[in-house]
Image (cartoon, rainbow, N blue to C red):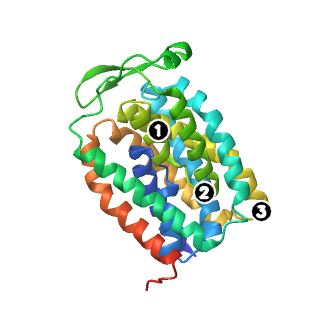
């Protein structure tokens, strides 16, 4: 029992650090770890990951808010779509078969890895501004932050607000259905569709993950998917890891982070997809 607690604490620490840096949430790391490494039923893994996502968001957001890295206006506006999507997704989990959840979650991991490879090949360092957007101007969504790597203030414009809003509904749906923060979708929506720089996209994603996860956590609590003996040590490790990760992110280049994480996320995604099709390991 003690060994399991220590393993969960360590896993939470690693997930919290990586989740805070990448804006992907601890769930995208912990769900495959709990199912593939510990053999936990995916329903309980998803319940624990929902709690982990809330812990990641709490630990990282405090630091990002203090350093003015996240965009509060963007987060609150887009959270309308993600919260609705999260509730719908959580209600659908009892309908979807386990094998389908494995394949769907694995596909999400592979897609996230593909997106990181695409960004890795890009010559942009994430500080390129987009032109003005009428919806962004009306809602006052543009922002600025201090990049500690390039050591200068970076101002940016937000564009394609309707497209980002639509993408956020899909992000919420994935969060509720898979028990993750769906940070991959959130970062893609802000970084790729809405043309925000990567660092504020990641920081803002961390804030939104917690709100989205909280919207669906009640459903998982009442259907018995959340087991305290698993969720509690994970949350403690993640809170510590997220605090560390939020500090590290501001001193790292995005390309370095992606080089480290791409092999991990692709391996886990392929494993999950194969297991969904009945291919077992070990």
x 65%, y 33%: residue: 80
Find the distance from the CA under tag 3 to the CA under tag 2.
Answer: 13 Å
Q: Disc 3 designates what residue?
A: 223
Disc 2 crowd rating (10 Å Cα; few below 14, some 14-19, many 20+) is: many
User: Which of labels 2 and 1 is toward the front?
Assistant: 1
x 55%, y 23%: residue: 73
Point out the tag, 3 or 1, that comes first from the N-terminus: 1
Q: Secondary structure at mark 1?
A: helix
Point out the tag, 3 or 2, that comes first from the N-terminus: 2
Which is nearer the eye, 234 or 25?
Answer: 25
Q: Secondary structure at mark 3?
A: loop
- The disc placed on residue 163 is none
Disc 1 crowd rating (10 Å Cα; few below 14, some 14-19, many 20+) is: many
Q: Disc 2 designates what residue?
A: 179
The correct choice, above or below, for 174 with respect to 135 in the image is below
Residue farthest to the bottom, as pictured: 282
Find the distance from the CA under tag 3 to the CA under tag 1.
Answer: 31 Å
- Percent across and percent down for residue 34 are 52, 69
The correct choice, above or below, for 43 with respect to 149 in the image is below
Q: Disc 1 designates what residue?
A: 189
x 62%, y 43%: residue: 212
- Percent across and percent down for residue 188 are 43, 42
Residue 8 is at least partly visible in this image? no
Dots 3, 1 in contact, CB < 8 A: no
The correct choice, above or below, for 242 with respect to 146 in the image is below
- Percent across and percent down for residue 15 are 45, 56
- Percent across and percent down for residue 128 are 29, 26
Find the distance from the CA under tag 2 to the CA under tag 1.
Answer: 19 Å
Which is nearer the eye, 103 or 162?
Answer: 162
């Amino acid at each position: 029992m003690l060994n399991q607690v220590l393993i969960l604490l360590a896993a939470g620490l690693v997930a919290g650090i990586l989740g805070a840096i990448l804006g992907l949430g601890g769930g995208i790391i912990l769900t495959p770890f709990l199912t593939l490494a510990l053999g936990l039923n995916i329903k309980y893994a998803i319940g624990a990951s929902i709690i982990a996502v809330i812990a990641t968001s709490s630990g990282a957001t405090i630091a990002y808010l203090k350093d003015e890295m996240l965009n509060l206006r963007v987060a609150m506006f887009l959270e309308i779509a993600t919260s609705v999507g999260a509730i719908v997704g959580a209600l659908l989990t009892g309908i979807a078969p386990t094998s389908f959840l494995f394949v769907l979650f694995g596909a999400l991991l592979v897609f996230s890895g593909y997106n990181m490879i695409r960004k890795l090949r890009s010559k942009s360092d994430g500080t390129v501004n987009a032109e003005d957007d009428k919806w962004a101007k009306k809602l006052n969504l543009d922002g600025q932050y201090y990049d500690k790597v390039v050591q200068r203030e970076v101002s940016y414009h937000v564009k394609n607000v309707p497209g980002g809003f639509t993408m956020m509904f899909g992000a919420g749906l994935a969060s509720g259905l898979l028990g993750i923060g769906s940070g991959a979708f959130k970062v893609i929506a802000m970084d790729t569709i809405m043309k925000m720089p990567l660092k504020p996209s990641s920081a803002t994603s961390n804030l939104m993950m917690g709100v989205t996860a909280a919207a669906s956590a009640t459903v998982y609590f009442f259907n018995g998917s959340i087991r305290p003996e698993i969720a509690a040590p994970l949350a403690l490790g993640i809170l510590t890891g997220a605090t560390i990760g939020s500090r590290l992110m501001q001193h790292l280049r995005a390309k370095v982070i992606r080089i480290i994480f791409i092999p991990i996320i692709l391996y886990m995604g392929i494993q999950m997809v194969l297991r969904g099709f009945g291919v077992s390991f070990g």
